[in-house]
Image (tube, rainbow, N blue to C red):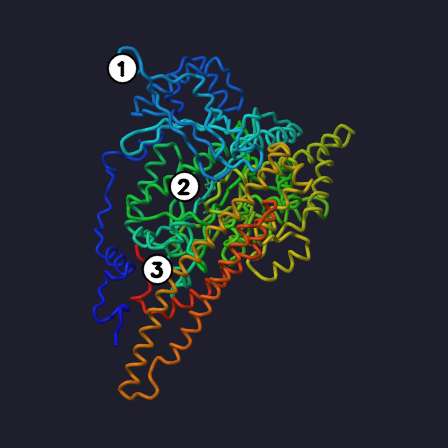
Amino acid sequence: MWTNRTDPRTYSPMSNPRHAALKAIADQQSDWDRLDFEGNHVKDLFGNNVFNTEQQRQRLPKEAFKALQQTIQYATPLPMEHANVIATAMKDWAMDMGATHYTHMFQPMTGLTAEKHDSFLSPGEGGRAIADFSGKELIKGEPDASSFPSGGLRATFEARGYTAWDPTSPAFVMHNPNGATLVIPTAFLSYTGEALDKKTPLLKSMAALDVQVRRVLKLFGKDPQRVTTTVGAEQEYFLVDKQFYVLRPDLVNCGRTLIGTEPPKGHELDDHYFGAIPERVLAYMSEVEAELFALGVPVKTRHNEVAPGQYEIAPIFENTNVATDHQMLIMQLLRRTADKYGLVCLIHEKPFAGVNGSGKHNNWSMGTSDGENLMDPGDNPHDNAQFLVLCAAVIHSVYKHGDALRMAIASAANDHRLGANEAPPAIMSVYLGDQLTDVFEQIEGGSAKSSKQGGLFQTGVDILPELPKEAGDRNRTSPFAFIGNRFEFRAVGSSANIAGPNTVINCMVAEAMGMMADKLEAATKGGTDLNEAIQSLLSEVIKEAKPVLFNGDNYSEDWHKEAESRGLPNFKKTTDALPVLKNEKTRKMLAPAYTGPEVDSRLNILSEAYAAQLDIEADTIALMAKTHVLPAAHRHLGQLVDSITDQKAIGIDAPAGLDTAKALSKTVADLEVAVTKLDSELAEAKAFDGEPLDHATHYTKAIIPAMDAVRALADSLETVVADDLWPLPTYREMLFLR
Ligand code: ADP
Ligand code: MG
């Protein structure tokens, strides 16, 4: 009776690709010792591949060195007469490091980095090659811009785009198999001068903030040369074995699983978080860190994250521009190095439904060129008027522009994570902690007279030391939390370029600082005592911004209701958040960083990217349903039917499996209907003719529900189809085997 279906009597593990992968992983050699750290201490590696201050000092004439340093520290323009000298020195250094090519690295609006490599070498006399790199080539590149998204800023035939050297972010040499390249961080602009990238608006936003914060500081008698924003971004990611990855079209095409049931064991036991790091993973992390160290990226922390298979890497904070470039390198090296260990690094926000997602906690502060951290309240915040003014401005900015802040982190991928019971919700609120909440409450009621103190923490065990206790606890559920000396914006997605969210934060804070400075300047000019002016301004600002303050559990249902009654926006989907870019209020706030047409272009690009992402996902899940899930289910059904027929043939009246077969048949038929429906919705969505935002919204409304329907049925089949017939690596395998 066995037909040409899989015959369990002749079954071998190799006939199921998933089982073959499992066997290969089990047989894996566990020798991950690739690097020699004894002969080569990591501390000696730091900045080795960077054209750093030491190299600059050694290789540049004094004048050029001083000018470059001035630019790096205070963002003053670099006099161009030095460009040629710097270019030559950089080239000589890079060639000494083995580089043959150089590239202008930029951050187009794809959210990735882009580079085009040119050789240093050109034909010289006598048929030999000479190495050449001029100041002109250093400061300006001309990649063809026509294939990068411009969101309508430019017609396709207007292909010219320029890259412009950013001397404030250090150039470095990137080694690759069989070569090395000098990488020069650049901004990317169109022929007509509009920003086609993420760096240009970020730099503008930092400059705007600098101006406004220094106005406030001036009132306190301070005059630093420069105020910059600082960022330390903690990066979460997953690792899966490459043998599994290649068997999952959804991971390969979309970076996340579109099908898959939750494993019997998830993170219920919390036994992964901060647990011992598996050997292969630790070896991988060490190599990523060593590489990053050599590139001058100050990585500091590594640990297991909440979900099985999830990890985190965090650098020490730097000025936001450099931190952003370094963050891109972190993602690049995480991805690239994984392959050497037979792993794949998933940076997607939600690779596994129902399992903790990945974010990028964006720790944000401001510092002066004199080394003062402006978000440090000191021991007695109630007495620190400068801090209170600056902090109140930040709070007010989140109150006023929470909708824009949500927009700044919007993507199809991050939508799966926000509000999914382990990530902050899409509602933007500020957590201040006990101490600051108390101080601001006092201010609201008149004036602040005291600050709650942390004191000492008694362990209750004699042999353990008394520990100094922070004055405020932390809140892991808050999207925008004050944590001692900085704000942590936790809602940023793990795959995002942090330039976007930081540009928005800087712009909104700059606007609030400007508002504070205007009022305080006017009051003091009018003869009011500064302290009195501050007192009344703070209480006015805090009264207004109060609805955005929330110290409780952001995951709870109650908060969603409460937030609604406070009038806080809750944009569940990207397409709910993007229209914010049409608001006058938002455009005015963003004006220091983006022109009107640039804002429009961002709206178009974000919409197009969202629709394209959903389109790829829908195509992929439909394909997987048709070519993986349905064939497996049909085989299983066939075997059941065969067995039932066999049982009947020997006289069993009520054969086992009959009900199962009937139920299975129904699910399979339902799945076929759901896939047909998805296909037709998709055809309609692809043919949709209209504005990019409307197109994207159409995908939200028509495609997401159609995909969800397919997934629910496919997932239920995974729980009944015979293991040896199921072709897709499962969650329990991908998350736990490494
Ligand atoms: P946790 O996981 O407990 O939040 P981590 O040590 O993993 O803490 O990350 C904290 C991040 O905050 C680090 O990148 C750190 O450098 C950064 N950070 C600390 N101080 C500042 C600051 N003044 N500005 C910006 N980031 C900061
Ligand atoms: Mg953190």
Q: CA distance from mark 1 to mark 3?
A: 55 Å
Residue bearing the label numbered 1: 128
Quadrant holding the C terminus: bottom left
Mark 1 or 2, closer to the camera:
1
Measured as percent of width and height from the top left, residue 565 is found at 68, 57
Q: Is residue 152 left or right of residue 241?
A: right
Q: Residue 119 appears in which quarter of the rendering? A: top left
- Looking at marks 1 and 3 on the same chain, the residue that comes earlier in the sequence is marked by 1
In the structure shown, which secondary structural element does the residue marked by tag 2 occupy?
helix
- Looking at marks 3 and 2 on the same chain, the residue that comes earlier in the sequence is marked by 2
Quadrant holding the N terminus: bottom left
Residue bearing the label numbered 2: 331
Residue at image coords 44%, 70%: 669
- Give the residue type that dot 2 points to: Met
In the structure shown, which secondary structural element does the residue marked by tag 1 occupy?
loop
Residue bearing the label numbered 3: 728
Name the one closer to the observer, 388 or 122.
122
Q: Is residue 678 left or right of residue 552?
A: left
In the structure shown, which secondary structural element does the residue marked by tag 3 occupy?
loop
- Looking at marks 1 and 2 on the same chain, the residue that comes earlier in the sequence is marked by 1
Q: How many marks?
A: 3
Q: Is mark 3 within 8 Å of ligand 1?
A: no
Measured as percent of width and height from the top left, residue 26 is found at 24, 57
- Residues at badges 1 and 3 in contact (C-beta under 8 Å)? no
Figure check: 116 above or below 276: above
Figure check: 616 above or below 533: below
Label 3: few (<14), some (14–19) or many (≥20) C-alpha neighbours in 10 Å: many
